[in-house]
Image (cartoon, helix red, strand yellow):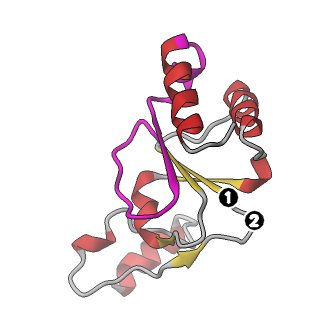
Amino acid sequence: MFEQQHYLQAMGIQEWQLIHPQRLAGYSPPIESLDKQCRLLLVSSLLPSGAQLVWLERVLNSFQLNLSQARHVYPHQLCQLELNDLQWIWYVDCQVSAVTTAKALHTPALSEVEGNTHHRRELWQQICSYGAQ
Protein backbone atom coordinates (compact mmCIF):
# COMPACT_ATOMS: atom_id res chain seq x y z
CA MET A 1 0.00 0.00 0.00
CA PHE A 2 2.83 2.41 0.86
CA GLU A 3 4.37 1.95 -2.59
CA GLN A 4 1.08 2.76 -4.29
CA GLN A 5 0.65 5.94 -2.25
CA HIS A 6 4.23 6.92 -3.06
CA TYR A 7 3.52 6.56 -6.80
CA LEU A 8 0.38 8.67 -6.53
CA GLN A 9 2.20 11.39 -4.60
CA ALA A 10 5.08 11.35 -7.10
CA MET A 11 2.51 12.03 -9.85
CA GLY A 12 1.12 14.96 -7.86
CA ILE A 13 -2.10 13.15 -6.90
CA GLN A 14 -2.93 14.15 -3.34
CA GLU A 15 -6.52 12.98 -3.20
CA TRP A 16 -8.54 10.35 -5.04
CA GLN A 17 -12.03 8.94 -4.90
CA LEU A 18 -13.22 5.37 -5.37
CA ILE A 19 -15.74 5.09 -8.18
CA HIS A 20 -17.14 1.76 -6.97
CA PRO A 21 -16.48 1.60 -3.21
CA GLN A 22 -19.09 -1.14 -2.82
CA ARG A 23 -16.64 -3.52 -4.51
CA LEU A 24 -14.28 -3.34 -1.54
CA ALA A 25 -15.24 -5.88 1.11
CA GLY A 26 -16.05 -4.24 4.43
CA TYR A 27 -15.76 -0.66 3.16
CA SER A 28 -18.59 1.78 3.74
CA PRO A 29 -18.24 5.18 2.08
CA PRO A 30 -18.95 8.16 4.32
CA ILE A 31 -22.43 9.61 3.87
CA GLU A 32 -22.36 13.35 3.20
CA SER A 33 -25.14 15.84 3.79
CA LEU A 34 -26.19 18.36 1.19
CA ASP A 35 -25.96 21.97 2.27
CA LYS A 36 -29.17 23.51 3.59
CA GLN A 37 -29.75 25.77 0.58
CA CYS A 38 -29.77 22.86 -1.89
CA ARG A 39 -33.31 22.32 -3.19
CA LEU A 40 -32.55 20.40 -6.40
CA LEU A 41 -29.97 17.71 -7.06
CA LEU A 42 -29.02 17.24 -10.72
CA VAL A 43 -27.77 13.68 -11.26
CA SER A 44 -25.90 13.53 -14.55
CA SER A 45 -22.78 12.00 -16.03
CA LEU A 46 -22.07 15.38 -17.68
CA LEU A 47 -21.55 18.63 -15.81
CA PRO A 48 -23.71 21.33 -17.46
CA SER A 49 -21.81 24.32 -18.79
CA GLY A 50 -22.20 27.31 -21.09
CA ALA A 51 -25.52 27.47 -22.91
CA GLN A 52 -26.81 24.46 -20.97
CA LEU A 53 -26.42 26.40 -17.71
CA VAL A 54 -28.40 29.32 -19.14
CA TRP A 55 -31.16 26.95 -20.24
CA LEU A 56 -31.05 25.09 -16.91
CA GLU A 57 -31.43 28.37 -15.05
CA ARG A 58 -34.53 29.23 -17.11
CA VAL A 59 -36.06 25.83 -16.30
CA LEU A 60 -35.30 26.22 -12.59
CA ASN A 61 -36.82 29.71 -12.56
CA SER A 62 -40.05 28.21 -13.94
CA PHE A 63 -40.58 26.50 -10.59
CA GLN A 64 -39.12 29.20 -8.33
CA LEU A 65 -35.56 27.86 -7.99
CA ASN A 66 -32.25 29.33 -9.06
CA LEU A 67 -28.81 27.92 -9.82
CA SER A 68 -27.52 28.63 -6.31
CA GLN A 69 -30.13 26.19 -4.99
CA ALA A 70 -29.08 23.38 -7.35
CA ARG A 71 -26.17 20.96 -7.03
CA HIS A 72 -24.71 18.53 -9.54
CA VAL A 73 -23.51 15.01 -8.72
CA TYR A 74 -22.35 12.19 -10.93
CA PRO A 75 -24.54 9.05 -10.78
CA HIS A 76 -21.89 7.04 -8.91
CA GLN A 77 -21.77 9.72 -6.17
CA LEU A 78 -25.47 9.53 -5.38
CA CYS A 79 -25.12 6.63 -2.93
CA GLN A 80 -22.77 8.80 -0.82
CA LEU A 81 -25.35 11.52 -0.14
CA GLU A 82 -28.03 11.90 2.48
CA LEU A 83 -31.17 12.97 0.62
CA ASN A 84 -33.57 13.55 3.53
CA ASP A 85 -34.35 17.26 3.09
CA LEU A 86 -34.12 17.39 -0.69
CA GLN A 87 -37.13 18.83 -2.57
CA TRP A 88 -36.25 17.87 -6.15
CA ILE A 89 -33.99 15.30 -7.80
CA TRP A 90 -33.43 15.45 -11.57
CA TYR A 91 -32.03 12.36 -13.27
CA VAL A 92 -30.44 13.35 -16.57
CA ASP A 93 -29.81 10.47 -18.95
CA CYS A 94 -29.31 7.97 -16.12
CA GLN A 95 -31.24 5.32 -14.22
CA VAL A 96 -33.11 6.07 -11.01
CA SER A 97 -30.96 4.77 -8.20
CA ALA A 98 -31.96 6.59 -5.02
CA VAL A 99 -34.86 6.09 -2.67
CA THR A 100 -36.10 9.50 -1.64
CA THR A 101 -39.31 11.42 -1.07
CA ALA A 102 -38.07 14.24 -3.31
CA LYS A 103 -39.99 15.13 -6.45
CA ALA A 104 -38.25 13.28 -9.29
CA LEU A 105 -37.66 14.47 -12.84
CA HIS A 106 -36.34 12.18 -15.59
CA THR A 107 -34.97 13.43 -18.90
CA PRO A 108 -32.52 12.53 -21.62
CA ALA A 109 -29.31 14.58 -21.83
CA LEU A 110 -29.84 18.32 -21.35
CA SER A 111 -28.54 19.00 -24.86
CA GLU A 112 -31.31 16.76 -26.24
CA VAL A 113 -34.06 18.31 -24.13
CA GLU A 114 -33.10 21.90 -24.85
CA GLY A 115 -33.51 21.57 -28.62
CA ASN A 116 -36.46 19.17 -28.72
CA THR A 117 -40.04 20.36 -28.27
CA HIS A 118 -41.29 16.88 -27.33
CA HIS A 119 -38.69 16.43 -24.56
CA ARG A 120 -39.28 19.97 -23.24
CA ARG A 121 -43.03 19.30 -23.11
CA GLU A 122 -42.44 16.03 -21.20
CA LEU A 123 -40.21 17.85 -18.70
CA TRP A 124 -42.80 20.59 -18.23
CA GLN A 125 -45.53 17.99 -17.66
CA GLN A 126 -43.39 16.32 -14.99
CA ILE A 127 -42.85 19.66 -13.24
CA CYS A 128 -46.55 20.52 -13.42
CA SER A 129 -47.56 17.10 -12.09
CA TYR A 130 -46.09 18.19 -8.74
CA GLY A 131 -48.10 21.42 -8.76
CA ALA A 132 -45.03 23.58 -9.39
CA GLN A 133 -45.86 26.12 -12.09
Q: Secondary structure at mark 2?
A: loop
Using the rendered view, name the quadrant where residue 117 is placed: top right
**Depth check, front residue: 7 or 36:** 36
What is the C-alpha distance between the residues marked 1 and 2?
6 Å
25 sits left or right of 125 in the view: left
Answer above or below: position of 64 versus 51.
below
Q: Secondary structure at mark 1?
A: loop
Per the image, the residue denoted by label 1 is 39
Residue 118 picture location, percent across and down: 49, 14
Per the image, the residue denoted by label 2 is 37
- Residue at 44% x, 64% y is 100
Q: Amino acid at mark 1?
A: Arg
51 sits left or right of 91 in the view: right
- Residue at 72% x, 25% y is 51
Q: Amino acid at mark 2?
A: Gln
Residue 31 picture location, percent across and down: 48, 79
83 sits left or right of 1 in the view: right
> Which mark, residue 83?
none
Report the magenta residues as a range.
91-117
- Residue at 56% x, 21% y is 120
Residue 32 picture location, percent across and down: 55, 77
Q: Split into 4 quadrants, where in the image is the C terminus?
A: top right
Answer above or below: position of 83 versus 104.
below
- Residue at 46% x, 82% y is 30
16 sits left or right of 20 in the view: right
